[in-house]
Amino acid sequence: MRYCESPFLYQRRQTREIIIGDPKNGGVILGGDHPVVKQSMITCDTMDTTLTVQQTLELVAVGCQLVRITAPTVKDAANLQVIVAQLRQQGCNVPIVADIHFKPEAAMEAVKWVEVVRVNPGNYADTKKFAIKEYNDEQYAEELRRIEEKFAPLVREAKRLNRCIRIGTNHGSLSDRIMNRFGDTPLGMVESALEFAHICRQQDFHNFKFSMKSSNPKVMIECYRLLVARLNQLGADWNYPIHLGVTEAGEGEDGRIKSAIGIGSLLCDGLGDTIRVSLTEDSPREIEVCDDLLAQIPLLSNHASRLPPQDFPFDPFHFERRVTPEIELNENTKCGGEQLIRVVVTRATFDKVAPKIRPKDDVKPEAVYEDLNLFEIDPTQDFEINCETQLVTVKDGVNLPVITAFRWLAAKLKRLGRNNPILLKDCINFDSAPLEPKIALLRASVVIGALLADGIGDAILVRGEAGGGQSLRLAYNILQAAGCRSFKTDYVACPSCGRTLFNLQTVTARIKARTEHLKGVKIAIMGCIVNGPGEMADADFGYVGGAPNKINLYVGKTPIKFNIPEAEAVERLVDLIKEHNKWVEPELPAAVV
């Protein structure tokens, strides 16, 4: 199976065109050779018509091309008629996407008023109970017939009204049927989506797209690759568009890094027709990141250099770190083998940050680039290497985009039968002027994150960020976002929507203030239960909106405490962390002498 023609040359995946709304009057065309479409989601209650219209207009003003609005009930779905009418009266013709979970009847109402209906196969026709049950083939077929009975009416209505459907699976919110046959895996997510796609095709309905979201960028990348490979297997007419996003990415640098790793790496491989950067921030800020990220893709992907045919240097569908021997970087640090992926800095950066490093600091240089015993290679030329314990990297100045250059290096080493550890760089050619910090962050995240998701890399060097301390912390943040190291508390935070039962930005800030010193602890902050229990499956603790002003606390995906008043919930979360022996007291700041 292949998800792209070559991991070394950019070729946009050719998808069928889907028309959403009137392209001559605010609508969009997805797929084909059309530009990638940017979308976002409003955060207010759908029954608040005035605020919903206002937030939609604010998104459109900054360039959002598709606006998603939640419709958790039939009442909310019915109010979409009023919302859309007011938007059109004000000259705003942006297509609206209704976000549906659990309620087919809400979808049947929403499809009357909006251009797109998003359904989640994990909960559209199922109530998730985390039940363990074995299904024989007959029972499984009966389940599929039951799903068809619930989903086919929406498909027929969408076809009649010329609407679009987004089939959007989420890691962690798969049905019990899928979980018990395929597990909470990329394959399970793909098969769940394909069940619904088959129903669409049985109705001769083709105006649909897919999404495969996860809060883990590596899982998200595997899901999309596997989806596209499976679609290719099914036939040329299965070339449906796909929407890219890392769900519950969080806020600030962490949210941007996670999104850049997941979305950026797939865009560089030619996948993706629409994108959303999900941030726990005001929605218009997502569009700025979309714009910045899309602008980097032509610079980071190989559009020109045609390299000789070469096998994939990694398994694109199952993450496995490239096997290398363990070597010494210096007298204090080893890399390769089972060692952590190490952080290397330039001598200039080391001289800036070393005086500020304290003995217990987790963020610190582990080796200096200029001091390494390093073999720098131009992978476009033939080379010989006789020792597998030699650290290697791509030579500066090579005329290839960085991702292509390092994949090509890994491929040539594989062909030579060598497993040398590799030092990854975020850039091998430099701009005349320093990059803006926000651009340096995105570029480094896409480049190094994509390669780490391929399983390539034993140490990393960030040089595109001009600031010494910023470049060091960015390197560690990329490793944390890619799931390679844990040096701080990890947060899974949803971006807020009309279902959210508390102010996510305020609560996230409060939780971080109390817990951000808990190295290696993963905390999920979820506005409601739609994706909560599933997306928290690999979190240690969860803080979830259960009802207005009431919070449920989880350990993993298991609810432990219910209906806690919001005013008490953060401290009760701290108590729960203490009960499970994950709490340490924060260090007091050093006294000023």
Image (cartoon, helix red, strand yellow):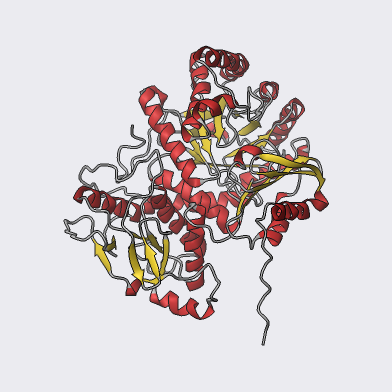
Q: Position of residue 137 (x, y in %)?
A: 50, 14
Q: Nearer the viewer, residue 369 or 53?
A: 369
Figure quadrant of the N terminus = top left
- Quarter where residue 9 is shown: top left
Residue extending farthest bottom: 593
* Residue 435, image quadrant: bottom left
Q: Is residue 34 visible?
A: no
- Coordinates of residue 123 in the picture (x, y in percent): 63, 27
525 or 157, nearer to the observer = 525
Near-viewer residue (474 or 88): 474
Question: Could you say where residue 342 lies in the image, as x and y percent from the top left?
Answer: 42, 63
Q: Where 351 falls versus 22 (above or below)?
A: below
* Image position of 467 with respect to 98: above or below: below
Q: Which residue is at 45% across, 42% downward?
A: 221
Where is residue 155 shown, x and y percent of the image?
57, 18
Judge from the rendering whether residue 423 lies leftward or rightward of residue 17; answer left or right.
left
> Residue shown at 67%/39% (left/top)?
558
Which of the 4 quarters of the picture holds residue 271?
A: top left
Residue 68 as seen in the image, left or right of residue 137: right
